[in-house]
Amino acid sequence: MYTDEYYMQLAIEEAKKAEAIHEVPIGAVIVWQDQIISRAHNLREIEQRAIAHAELLAIDDACKKLGTWRLEDATLYVTLEPCPMCAGAIVLSRVKRVVYGAADPKGGCAGTLMNLLNEERFNHQAQVVSGVLQEECGRLLSDFFRKLREKKKAKKLGESSKK
């Protein structure tokens, strides 16, 4: 049996695939009965679909592979704390455990802004483990956005020097 760190490292590999195609580097892996049944990374920009988050893509693929919408014995590993949309999908698909790396202070719904995954009024709650390989997951995101800001700044400077 592998550790949460092992599976998070695989989610990080997915995040790096996203980064390589200029997507926000977020990756997800779903494990069921000690087997990886799904892997995904963000594809919002490539597909121009708001719902193409790593978690949703991984959940959809896992449901197709298992032939059921119920992922009751599954663990979702994701490099960034799930947003409201993804937290909703996690609850509705009955994912048993969610393990995430970096907290999301602007949109995290697994304990940072709110905790939709443990909301007792819902008919399902997921176990949450936070901060697994947090520094590496966070660094991927902060480096990505820093490079993006630098690129935008350089473009702006280039445009202003042509005037």
Image (spheres, rainbow, N blue to C red):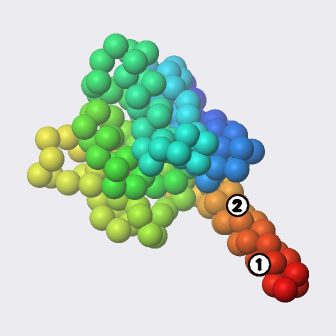
Quarter the C terminus occupies: bottom right
Q: Is residue 114 above or below residue 78?
A: below
The kind of residue tagged 2 is: Phe
Q: Is residue 101 above or below residue 70?
A: below
Callout 1 touching callout 2 (CB < 8 Å): no
> What is the C-alpha distance between the residues marked 1 and 2?
18 Å
Mark carried by residue 144 = 2
Q: Position of residue 20 (x, y in %)?
A: 75, 45
Q: Decide which of 3, 116 is in the foreground and name it.
A: 116
Q: Earlier in the sequence, mark 1 or mark 2?
A: 2
Q: Badge 1, how many Cα within 10 Å: few under 14, some, many 20+?
A: few
Q: Badge 2, how many Cα within 10 Å: few under 14, some, many 20+?
A: some
Determine the image quadrant of residue 143. bottom right
- Residue at the spot x=78%, y=68% of the render? 151
- Label 1 belongs to which residue? 156
Give left or right: position of 64 versus 91.
right
**Circle 2 SS class:** helix
Q: Position of residue 80 (x, y in %)?
A: 52, 54
